[in-house]
Image: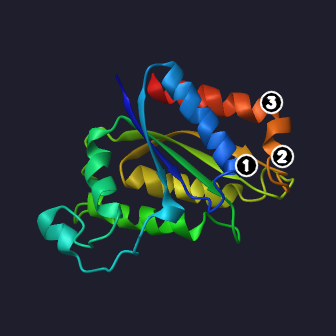
Amino acid sequence: MKKIISFLGSPNKNGNTSILVNRAIQGAVSKKADVREFYLNSLVLKGCQACMSCRKTRWCAVKDDARQILEDIPDCDGIIFGTPVYMFEMTGQMKLLIDRFFCYLNDDFTHRLGEGKDCIFIFSQGNADEKAFLPYFTSVSKAMQMLGFNVKKIIIGNGLTKLGMVKDRPELLEQAYQAGQMLAG
């Protein structure tokens, strides 16, 4: 059974991003994956403190809710990252967590995750132009690859200006479901 971790970076538990992430989770569960979900807005997360402790101990020294997450990631098989686009980027909640992934880098900027972890990104945005933030999504994907994550799929839910609007976009819901299935293998 594959172990999947899901991160919802939206402060809205019932928003478009949440709906898409839940659909990806349903896809993973349909393939018998064990999914552990984290709603980042309810966690106490601090940013990287640049203490470099992780260079000596291989683990982040900051004591907050991210600590257990960081210890669980090496044992999981896949990750679902879901975030709306706020001010041209992922939410602050998601950025706080991803900055802490610095602990997976060695001094020579190779990663410590072995073969790496397969992941998918789900971005929702109000902008109708699906490619409006594509340079940012590509940059995030490259950063994640350096950290040892294999970005298998980026789903862009564009033009989602109202709460729950994604429910009227069956093609997006199906993309998320299939991405979850793919992640679960």
Tell me, for residue 16, which label it has, or none.
Answer: 1
Task: Give the residue drawn at x 35%, y 64%.
Answer: 65
Per the model, the C-alpha gap separating discs 3 and 2 is 11 Å
Among the two numbered marks 3 and 2 on one chain, the one whose residue lies closer to the N terminus: 2
* Mark number displayed over residue 170: 3
Residue 86: % across, % down: 69, 67
Residue 80 visible in the shown view? yes
* Residue 165's disc number: 2
Q: Nearer the viewer, mark 3 or mark 2?
A: 2
Q: Residue furthest top?
A: 31
User: Which of the 4 quarters of the picture holds residue 53?
Assistant: bottom left
- SS assignment at label 3: helix
Q: Quadrant of residue 69?
A: bottom left
In the displayed structure image, the side of residue 163 where residue 124 appears, left or right: left
In the picture, which quadrant includes the N terminus?
A: top left
Of the residues under marks 1 and 2, which one precedes in the sequence? 1
Instruction: Evaluate if marks 1 and 2 touch, with contact meaning CB atoms under 8 Å apart.
Output: yes
SS of the residue at dot 1? helix
Residue 155 in view (yes/no): no
